[in-house]
Amino acid sequence: MKPEEKQADILWSRAIKKRAGGRCELCGKEGREAHHLFKRQYKSVRWDLDNGVCLCLGCHHLAHSKPAQFAEWIINRRGKAWYDRLEQRKNVLGKPDMREILKNLSVSPPQNSPLWSFLGRL
């Protein structure tokens, strides 16, 4: 992994947890895990804050062991139109601009802010 990707991963994880106020967005317990809704292999949304949710360890395990139920929960919480837009962004090909991503992730999102994306909207 390239150093700038590792740095972006750390910043993304911190931003996801901060946005949720350090609470699991599923059960409300202390949230220590930042979970990617679409796998990290999709670089077009890897560092997109819309692609993350803060979870406790137990709920993070649940997200991986029951992905269909977890997807249903997140769609109910954030909306089908939101999910469809994120899925479209996931399929965008091209090399991410790591300098821009790092710059954007270095700006801390407000705690409990409405969902937004640093990487733009389709």
Image: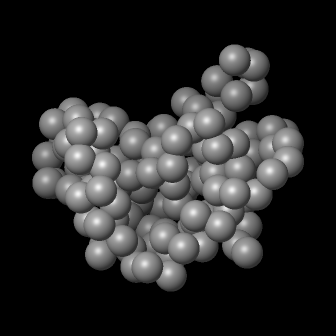
In the rendered image of this protein, does residue 115 appear above or below residue 23?
below
- Quarter of the view holding residue 20: bottom left
Q: Nearer the viewer, residue 68 or 20?
A: 68
Quarter of the image with the C terminus in it: bottom right
Q: How is the image coloured?
A: one colour
- Quarter of the view holding residue 3: top right
Lateral position of residue 75 relative to residue 26, left or right = right
Quarter of the image with the N terminus in it: top right
Q: Can residue 46 be seen by looking at this rendering?
A: yes
Name which residue lies at 38% across and 52% down: 53
Residue 74: percent from left, percent from top: 33, 65
Name which residue lies at 14% across and 54% down: 27
In the rendered image of this protein, does residue 25 appear above or below residue 35?
below
Lateral position of residue 81 relative to residue 105, left or right = left
- Quarter of the view holding residue 58: top left
Name which residue lies at 24% across and 39% down: 65
Q: Can residue 22 be seen by looking at this rendering?
A: no
